[in-house]
Structures are given as C-alpha cells and as structure tokens.
Amino acid sequence: MMGARHAVSRRGFVGGLATAVGYLGLKPDGELWAQGGPPRAGLAPLAAPRRQDYDSLAKLASNENPYGPSDLVLKAMSDAFKYSNRYGYPDGDIQEAIAKHHGVDPDNILLGAGSSEILEVVGLAFLETGQKVVGVEPTYGTVYQQATSIRADAIRVPLLEDFRQDIPGIIKATNRNYRDVGFVYLCNPNNPIGRIITAQEVRQVLDSIPEDMPVLIDEAYHHFIDDPAYATSVPYVLEGRPVIIARTFSKISGLAGMRLGYAVAPRELIQRMRPYSTGTVNALVKWGGVAALNDTETNERVKRVNRELRTKAIAELEGLGYSVIPSETNFFMVHIRRPVQPVITAFREKGVLVGRPFPPMLDYLRVSVGTADEMSRFSTAFKQVFTTAAASRSQ
Ligand SMILES: Cc1ncc(COP(=O)(O)O)c(C=O)c1O
C-alpha cells in the first residue's frame, strides 16, 4: 500500500518536473550555475542560461565528460532519429546489451533516465515514511534529498580523517538501527571526494549487516578507477545478494544530456523497483547506449586523458602549496583553506564554473576535470583568485 502511494505521488512529481524541463530546456535543478548535475529531487528549476554564456564557460562544476559522445555513438543516435515519431520501435536491444555486458539476465536490469532516476526509484521502493537510509556525509546528495522528500531520513556517518568512507561506522549505524533502515547507500567512488571503497570493504559491509538489507552501490565513476583494490560489485548480483548497482552513461560515455542509466540487481529487487520507474528513456540514447558499451577504445581514451589532466592539475596545485585529496575519478577536491563560496563566485567571474559547496567541507573546492584548454583556464584563474585573495588579506 505504501508503495502504491509513493508511485502515484512520484508520477505526479516527475510529470510536473518533466514539463518544466521541456519548456526551459535545462536540467530540472538548474544547478548548472551552482554546481550542475543531474536532477535533484525537490528543487525547482532556475532560469535557463543564455547559450552564448554557456558556450564560453569552462564547465568544471558537474563532473561531466567534456568531450561528449564518440563518433560511433553520435552515428547510432543520428540513425535512430527516424524513430522520433514512434512509441514502439526497435531499441537496439539496449536492455539485453547491458545484461550481456555484465553477464547477467535482462531481468536483472532496470533502465532509467540517468542513474538519478535509479537512485530515486530505490528510495521509493525501499524507504517507507519515517525510515532511514544509511550512508556517509558528504556524498552524492540525490539519495538523501529524495529520502527527505518522502518524509524518510538519512543517517549520515562522517568520513574518516583521510576522507575515506567509515565502513565500521556504516555497519554499526545500520545494525543499531536496522529495524528503521530501508537501505544502505555506498557511493563508490564517492562524489564529491573521489576516493574508493575497496572490494574488501564492500564485502565487509555485506557480510556484517542483516543479510536481507538492500545495499545501493552507486558506481557512476566506475570507468575512471585505476586502483586495483577496487572491484565492481556486480558479481554480488549473481550471488543473489540484495545489492543494487547503479551505473550511468553520463560520465565515461559523455551522454549526460541524453539521460541514460540503469540498475543491475537480483530479479526480485528489480521487480520491487519497476513500478516506480517512468520508462521515459528516449529512442536516441537507447541506440547511443548500445554503441557506447561497445566503444571500448573511446572509453579507454577518455579514461587516460582524464588521468593525465587530473594528475597534472593536482601536481600544479600541490606545487602551489595546496593539498588535494587523492582521486580515482574525473574530479578532485582541493583544500583551499578559506571559505569556498566566495572562491566559487570569483571563479565564475573569470568564466570558470567549479563545484558548489559540500558541507561540512566548506574550505574545499571540487573541480571537475575538463579539457586541456579548460584546465589551463582553471589554472590561470586559480593563480589570479588566490593571489588577489592573499593580496587583499595582507593589506
Ligand atoms: C555519484 C553519482 N551518482 C549518480 C549521478 C547521476 O548521474 P546521471 O543521472 O546523469 O546518471 C551522479 C552525477 O553527477 C553522481 O555523481
């Protein structure tokens, strides 16, 4: 009963949101100017940016792929335009292609309009009013925001001193409150930090909490990771553990604006989630997604260039005397040792969008890795912003 009520209210919410998005031609949270990023539950859209403003900015705020989809993916999407006027059409067998990619059955896959939809669907399916999701703070906000929007709540476990996730803390919080906990959220690697949860730590969580407790493992940045201590948690689905893996085509495949993500989970969990999903994935990105899965060469290139530019930017910042949290992703956090909001504004005035504040880490700046050109604009702006700030403090 509870589930049905959520499904209805969600449909109303998503419908209204989709309409607003359609009119304004931007993502629902309007975060483009604050952080950028995919839909965040419960936030109203802001005014659309002017196109010429948008094009001229260095966009290092939303952990996007600055290169966009590969030629192969673009061609697949262009070829699918002919289905624009259809409701039913060949969809490239996207669900089967994803299942094959992971070695699971199509029944283990649920598509979403971005992985944001998957995160929301998990909240709707597994959280009752008054229940709690357990995860760390800071982490990717959608899950907690959505919990709040359905009058559930989050138990936010602080990060460790080295900014890794406190695995014993998550286990303890889950076990102490297990009657009230709807699911556990592990963002791996964690946005906005960039650090991984090791394969061994994921196993420790699964082995230490009630065996039927759902665990949502958000692998949005999976493709950027080099650390051999990390492993995807998809194999747990084959073991029948109650895990839901969220993946996206927004990051490595450069398809954020096209909205395609998915869940990999045991069939029973997918069945619980399905009533809450909208099924609004568009024809183009279904074909684009299939092409992107096969385009391993481009994925490798994006990963390599991202690593090179991230390493260079971090070395430069460290050379300037600023410490940076190690990152396995397409973003990193630099300790700027002063309040971040005025710094974000100063960057914006120089045409560089950087990440929004992430409480409680209000003296850290999150920077997404852009193109080489965008990173050199960031570097120039950084030196200007910090020299000016130092100069004005010494007056
Ligand atoms: C950790 C994490 N999960 C999920 C998402 C949602 O991405 P999308 O809805 O575009 O798939 C993001 C986007 O920034 C993210 O950082």
Image (tube, rainbow, N blue to C red):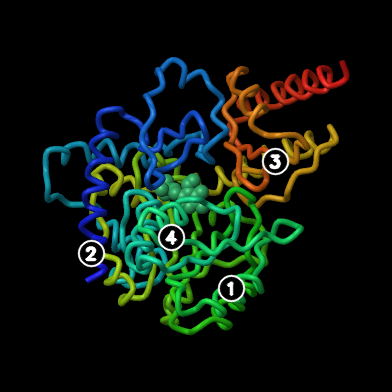
Label 1 – label 2 distance at C-alpha: 29 Å
Q: Residue at x 57, y 60 (%)?
A: 188
384, above or below 112, in the image: above
25, above or below 194, in the image: above
Residue position for label 3: 364
User: Closest to the observer: 207 or 284?
Assistant: 207
Q: Is residue 209 left or right of residue 28?
A: right
Mark before the other along the chain sequence, 4 or 3: 4
For disc 4, does the CB lie below 8 Å from ligand 1? Answer: yes
Label 1 – label 3 distance at C-alpha: 27 Å
Disc 1 and disc 4 in contact, CB within 8 angstroms:
no
61, above or below 205, in the image: above
Quick one: SS at disc 4? strand
Residue position for label 2: 275
Amino acid residing under circle 4 = Ala
Q: Is residue 235 left or right of residue 122?
A: right
Q: Position of residue 154 (x, y in %)?
A: 50, 62
Residue position for label 4: 246
Label 2 – label 4 distance at C-alpha: 17 Å
Mark before the other along the chain sequence, 2 or 4: 4
Amino acid residing under circle 3 = Tyr
Amino acid residing under circle 1 = Ala
Q: Position of residue 140 (x, y in %)?
A: 52, 52
Q: Position of residue 166 (x, y in %)?
A: 67, 66
Mark before the other along the chain sequence, 1 or 4: 1
Label 4 – label 3 distance at C-alpha: 27 Å
Mark before the other along the chain sequence, 3 or 2: 2
Quarter of the figure with residue 176:
bottom right
Residue position for label 1: 173
Question: Mark 4 against mark 3, which lies toward the viewer?
Answer: 3
Mark before the other along the chain sequence, 1 or 3: 1
Q: Residue at x 41, y 62 (%)?
A: 152
